[in-house]
Structure formats: structure tokens, C-alpha cells
Image: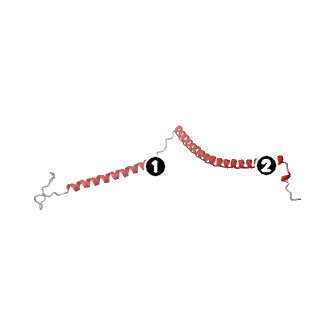
Amino acid sequence: MFGTNLLERRSKPERIADQAWQHLVSAVNSAGDSIRDTARTARHSSAGLADEAGDLVESAAEEARHRASQALDALAGRRPALPWALLIGAALVGAAVGWAAGTAARAAGSRDQALEDIEFVDVEQPDSPAEPTNPAT
């Protein structure tokens, strides 16, 4: 009959070799998948490390350019520019602190004046004011 299975007619060593081949192909494919996954993971993590390293190199290069520019200016006899923003900021902070201290001093002075204006009453004669205790008046 034509419907016979040709694989069953092979010899036992041929079947064992075929099974071994199938297992080998399966193992290589699964190993290739895991290697690809590992390579993807390594590529992603190395890309992040490369970005960080690039940022560090870029900031170091920028600092080196800045220092080289300062050294060139110093060799040429040029003085560094004044930090105007810092000076103006310090002046504004000083003015604000001075204003706050002046306001606090005026407030404290007005409280002392209010204490001096208190009129004392003699307890034995409630209707008459007592003599001032302040010798200045």
C-alpha cells in the first residue's frame, strides 16, 4: 500500500541519528534565542553606560575648555571679569536685611514708648492719679 510510513522503515541507527539531530537543532535554536536575549540586554545596559560615560566626558571636556580659556587669559595679562550678578545679589540681600533690622528696631522702640505712657493710679485713692514715678517729668 502507498500509505505506509517511510520513517518506520528506516533502521534503528538512522532513527537514533535523526532524533539526535533534532535535539541538536532544538538546543542550538534555544541557545541562540537565549544568546540573542542576552545580547539585547547587554546592548541596552551598555547603551545606558555609554550615555553616562559620554555625559562625563562632555562635562570634563567643557571644564577643560573653561580652564584653558582662563589660563590663556591669565597668560595674556587679562583680568577675570567681575561677577556682577553675584555683587548685585549680595547688595540686594544686604538691603533687605538692613530694612528688616530697621523695621524691627522701630517696632521695639515704639513698644518701649507705649510702656512709658502708662498712668499709674493710687490704690488708696482710686479717683486721683498717682504721682508720676518717672523722675524726668
Q: Residue furthest left?
A: 124
- Residue at the image position 38 percent from the left and 49 percent from the top: 94
Give the amino acid at mark 2.
Gln
Q: Position of residue 130 (x, y in %)?
A: 12, 57
Residue 85 — which label? 1
Q: Alpha carbon of mark 1 to alpha carbon of mark 2: how far?
A: 81 Å
Q: Position of residue 36 (x, y in %)?
A: 69, 49
Crowd around label 1: few <14 · some 14–19 · many ≥20 (10 Å): few
Describe residue 34's horizontal placement relative to residue 123 as left or right. right
Of residue 122 and residue 28, the one placed in the foreground of this image is 28
Q: Residue furthest right?
A: 1
Quadrant of the image for the C terminus?
Answer: bottom left
Quadrant of the image for the N terminus?
Answer: bottom right
| Residue that carries the numbered disc 2 in the rendered image | 19
Of residue 111 and residue 136, the one placed in the foreground of this image is 111
Crowd around label 2: few <14 · some 14–19 · many ≥20 (10 Å): few
Q: Residue 120, relative to residue 17: is it above or below?
A: below
Of residue 87 and residue 102, the one placed in the foreground of this image is 102
Describe residue 28's horizontal placement relative to residue 50 as left or right. right
- Residue at the image position 84 percent from the left and 53 percent from the top: 8
Residue 8 — which label? none
* Label 1: which secondary element: helix
Report the colour scheme. Answer: secondary structure
Q: Earlier in the sequence, mark 1 or mark 2?
A: 2
Give the amino acid at mark 1.
Ala
Res 115 quadrant in image: bottom left
Q: Position of residue 88 (x, y in %)?
A: 43, 49
- Residue at the image position 77 percent from the left and 49 percent from the top: 22
Q: Position of residue 24 (x, y in %)?
A: 76, 47
